[in-house]
Amino acid sequence: MTTISVNVPELIMTALAERAKNSGYSDVSEFVSQYILQLAARLSEVEELAIEGLRSGPSEPWNPEEIDAIRERLKSKYGS
């Protein structure tokens, strides 16, 4: 395994340490490594979905009601 060093402000290190502890990781290094792996997997998934969308053929424009419905779903899920 390769090791890298990253300098972060103390405030960020404190937040990382707290998140690692609350998530059950043995240390910040393990937490960050797993987080990066999860991020890479999610990025691959998003890329695959984008390619699938491109291959699915031409799209049709959304009407204003569809856009409003999407906005409302996002607001209810993530807040405004």
Image (cartoon, helix red, strand yellow):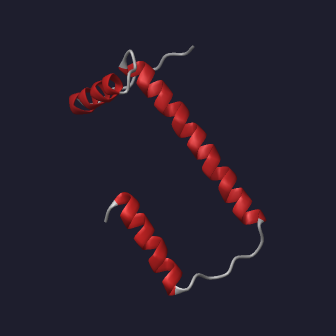
Picture quadrant of residue 68: bottom left
The residue sitting at the left extreme is: 11
- Quarter containing the N terminus: top right
- The answer to whether 71 is drawn above or below residue 46 in the figure is below
Q: Is residue 32 left or right of residue 57?
A: left
| Residue 46, x across and y down, in percent | 61, 51
What count of labels does the image hold? 0
Picture quadrant of residue 20: top left
| Residue 13, x across and y down, in percent | 28, 27
**Residue beneath the point at 32% across and 22% down:** 21
Residue in front for this viewpoint, 78 or 28: 78
- The answer to whether 32 is drawn above or below residue 38 in the figure is above
Residue in front for this viewpoint, 68 or 27: 68
**Residue beneath the point at 44% across and 20% down:** 30
| Residue 66, x across and y down, in percent | 53, 80
**Residue beneath the point at 31% across and 65% down:** 80
- The answer to whether 42 is drawn above or below residue 50 in the figure is above
- The answer to whether 26 is drawn above or below residue 22 in the figure is above
Q: Is residue 46 left or right of residue 33?
A: right
| Residue 67, x across and y down, in percent | 49, 78
